[in-house]
């Protein structure tokens, strides 16, 4: 068993009021006694989030960027230092096997992924290096991530920093959902700063002394869900392809050379339609029930998908992401299974049911904030109800 797969408990769990998170966030705090206040602080850019349960893999050597470029979904050959990207390792059939944030410091490429993915990702990379001049290491035991509501790349002399550029469409990418200027993700700046693991508590204290408060994963997950941002630990299953999650925006270059899974990426983009689609769920909060991840999404008595992420938002109330069949009408209301009884849910379109990307000829559905607001007023439980 490697360091990244052993049971983990952050030193910040000893803080007063800390309640440990569950599921993929086990090992760090869900909240520190004031989840609503923590979430409001993060939303205004005045909080730091312990993300030390994430995994970190490094790739060193002169061939590192051209090699990663050739075997993953991202265009990395010639990537400038301190420029953040995302990548997928795909199966030959185009299913997502690994997802990671990527940044290079000029000497080493850093991959930030889910903790349980770090060791398998490092092992797969090691098998693929052949005679190339690259060195792969799972360094999760040495480096910890902290999250900040900031959208700025790291500067020379600063710690290694990965910036989430969601919902922008990076060069070579495309989108199925809203234009970045109309996308709710544009309101969520986010980055991960890597610090030596023994310096984690000190790095957090430094930010607290600057006026920020410490927030738990409840706050971060609620804002991520609001931003329609998929996460590897929750939205990806064994069948997931990037198109279904609108993740071609930031993690796939459609026009670069061949890599494993590229045929599926190109075929679905150019000729087909994603078999499923990501949706945002406005859950009925009147009964105080909240579904679990994996709960069935139903139309009448028929299961059409499953909840992938769920949280209580400080303004919107209970919200979730889910993956449903592409054929499910965009205006239908759902019911969602809960312990204690099913609850109703409106849906907000993330990936349109027509399954056509923005740069492929075809009729586009409405994805603007105006269209979203109109749908809410016409019966869907609105974003601010």
Image (cartoon, rainbow, N blue to C red):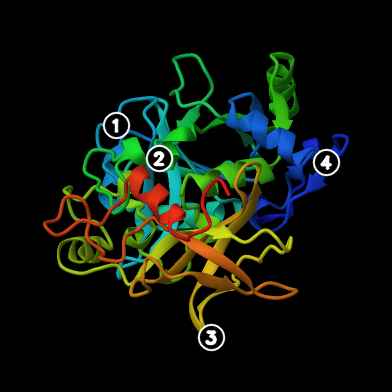
When the figure is inspected, residue 45 is found, relative to residue 289, above or below; the finding is above
Image location (x, y in percent) of residue 176: 28, 54
Q: Earlier in the sequence, mark 3 or mark 1?
A: 1
Q: Residue at label 4?
A: 18
Q: Earlier in the sequence, mark 3 or mark 4?
A: 4
Q: Please name which of the two marks, 2 or 1, marks the residue nearer to the observer.
A: 2
Q: How crowded is mark 2: few (under 14 residues within 10 Å), some or many (20 or more)?
A: many
Question: Does the residue at mark 2 contact the one at mark 1 (Cβ under 8 Å)?
Answer: no
Q: Which of marks 2 and 1 is nearer the N terminus?
A: 1
Q: How crowded is mark 3: few (under 14 residues within 10 Å), some or many (20 or more)?
A: few
- Measure the alpha-carbon separation of dots 2 and 4: 29 Å
Q: Please name which of the two marks, 2 or 3, marks the residue nearer to the observer.
A: 3
Q: Please name which of the two marks, 3 or 4, marks the residue nearer to the observer.
A: 3
Which residue is depicted at the point 49% across and 31% down? 189
Q: In this view, does 5 lie to the left or right of 299?
A: right
Q: Residue at label 3?
A: 301
SS category of the residue bearing label 3 = loop
SS category of the residue bearing label 4 = loop
| Quarter of the image that includes the N terminus | bottom right
Which residue is depicted at the point 48% across and 54% down? 121
Residue 44 seen in render: yes
- Measure the alpha-carbon separation of dots 2 and 3: 35 Å
Which residue is depicted at the point 60% across and 51% down? 115
Residue 196 seen in render: no
Q: Which of marks 2 and 4 is nearer the N terminus?
A: 4
Q: Residue at label 1?
A: 79
- Measure the alpha-carbon separation of dots 3 and 4: 40 Å
Question: Does the residue at mark 4 contact the one at mark 1 (Cβ under 8 Å)?
Answer: no
Question: Does the residue at mark 3 contact the one at mark 1 (Cβ under 8 Å)?
Answer: no
SS category of the residue bearing label 1 = loop
Q: Residue at label 2?
A: 166
């Amino acid at each position: 068993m490697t360091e990244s797969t052993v049971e983990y408990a952050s030193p910040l769990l000893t803080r007063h009021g800390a309640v440990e998170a569950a599921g993929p966030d086990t090992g760090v705090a869900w909240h520190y006694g004031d989840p609503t206040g923590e979430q409001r602080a993060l939303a205004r850019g005045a909080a730091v989030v312990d993300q030390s349960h994430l995994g970190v893999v490094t790739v060193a050597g002169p061939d590192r960027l051209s090699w990663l470029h050739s075997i993953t979904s991202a265009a990395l050959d010639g990537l400038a230092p301190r420029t953040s990207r995302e990548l997928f390792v795909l199966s030959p059939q185009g299913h997502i096997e690994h997802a990671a944030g990527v940044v290079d410091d000029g000497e080493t490429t850093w991959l930030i992924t889910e903790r349980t993915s770090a060791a398998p990702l490092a092992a797969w990379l090691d098998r693929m290096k052949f005679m190339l001049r690259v060195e792969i290491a799972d360094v999760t035991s040495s480096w910890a991530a902290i999250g900040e509501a900031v959208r700025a790349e790291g500067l020379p002399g600063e710690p290694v920093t990965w910036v989430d550029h969601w919902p922008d469409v990076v060069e070579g990418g495309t989108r199925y959902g809203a234009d970045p200027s109309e996308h709710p993700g544009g309101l969520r700046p986010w980055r991960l700063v890597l610090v030596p693991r023994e310096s984690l508590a000190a790095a957090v204290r430094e930010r607290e002394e600057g006026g920020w408060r410490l927030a738990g994963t409840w706050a971060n997950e609620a804002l991520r869900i609001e931003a329609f941002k998929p996460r590897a630990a929750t939205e990806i299953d064994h069948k997931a392809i990037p198109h279904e999650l609108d993740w071609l925006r930031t993690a796939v270059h459609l026009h670069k050379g061949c890599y494993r899974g590229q045929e599926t990426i190109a075929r679905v983009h150019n000729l087909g339609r994603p078999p499923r689609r990501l949706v945002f769920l406005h859950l009925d909060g009147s009964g105080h029930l909240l579904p679990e991840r994996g709960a069935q999404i139903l139309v009448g008595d028929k299961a059409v998908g499953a909840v992938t992420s769920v949280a209580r938002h400080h303004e919107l109330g209970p919200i979730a992401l889910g993956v449903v069949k592409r054929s499910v009408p965009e205006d239908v209301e759902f019911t969602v299974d809960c312990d204690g009884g099913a609850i109703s849910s409106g849906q907000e379109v993330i990936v349109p049911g027509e399954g056509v990307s923005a740069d492929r000829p075809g009729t586009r559905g409405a994805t603007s904030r105006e269209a979203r607001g109109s749908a809410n007023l016409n019966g869907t439980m609105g974003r601010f109800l």
